[in-house]
Amino acid sequence: MGARAQYVVVANGAWQRYYSHWAADRVVNDLLPGPVAATRCFRANREIDEWLDDVWCEGAALVDHDRRILLWFAFADSWADHIAARAVLARTWPGWDVRFAHDGMGDLTHHLGLGRSLTRAPGWFETFEPSGFAATESAEPSSVVSLRLPDGSVRAWGSDWEQPIDHLAAGPGLIDLLVASPSITPALTDMPYGGVHVDPQARTVSLWAVQTVAGIHDWPLPRWENWSLDFRGDDHTQQARLLPTDFPLPQPPLTAALRRLGDGLATPPPDNGPLLAGATAVRSPEGTVPVVNPAALIPHEPADPTPAELSALRTALDALVVTA
């Protein structure tokens, strides 16, 4: 159990890996005060000599001081939380190339010249044969899928499939599933986590997401041979322009998300050690012995910004709240 995070620091031509068992949901908090504070935080946690894989690593960051590049990924509770984090990092990492690692650990290992498959098992991308498209009756779908029809018009659907890349696992057969789906879905009340647009005439798939899309750079994915991919990162604006006028993407304000980031600065990570240690005393089924991963007993060492770093961060947050 845990929310595992991996950190990598590159400096003077060398790199080191660090690990925290409980930090995946705190990656953004650790990055917000800037590169110096983030590096102190990473080095305060446990140095390791191995890579977490895409299954177990739920958040990560690579800070390359030599090239002034930051790569990071973590799950965001909403589109606004992701965009707010990007906006703050753009101010607190001035002069740095700040990139969201859409390919997850693949982006980190690729940056180091180790390729993208180091942390992935062979055959990791699994296609499937869905019986139908997971259109949703909810006004808050996980993603939005749109299709250009032969007459040039575009139809759109909200989708319950969890991640945008899940739609690609169905292959071009997705097109028939969409056409057979009801054309009326609720107007959206919040931004989805991502979107997919399929243009059969141009044989092009466009995709955007505010979460990881592991394997997105391994195009063509199975079944999509002879199709082109237009990966937009976290930029939803192209799909927004294509959607029917009665199915617009909402534009929620970032104010609440920015304030949540500010509130998180004063919230220390929980120490789960005592709780887990007590779990070993719980009566277990006969013949079993409860075991706690020793790494789970080590609390995360969070970023501890200096007064100057904290002041600069507060100034950035305040300025963004005013313009949100």
Image (cartoon, helix red, strand yellow):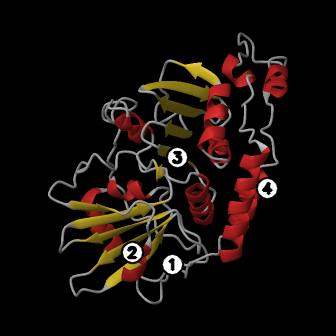
Return the x and y of residue 316 as percentages of the image width and height: 68, 61
**Residue extending furthest left?**
226
Q: Residues within 10 Å of mark 4 (few under 14, many from 20)?
A: few
Does 248 appear above or below 92? below
**Mark 4 → mark 3, Cα distance in angstroms:** 20 Å
Indicate which label's residue lies in the foreground, 2 or 4. 4
In percent of the image, x 68 and y 26: which residue is there? 44
Residue corresponding to mark 3: 73
Q: Earlier in the sequence, mark 2 or mark 3?
A: 3
* Tag 3 near tag 1, CB within 8 Å: no
Secondary structure beneath dot 2 equals: helix
Q: Is residue 22 visible?
A: yes
Q: Earlier in the sequence, mark 4 or mark 3?
A: 3
Mark 4, residue position:
263
Marking on residue 249:
1
Residue type for callout 2? Gln
Quarter of the image for the N terminus: give it.
top right
- The residue positioned 32% from the left and 66% from the top of the image is 206
Q: Which image quadrant for residue 23?
A: top right
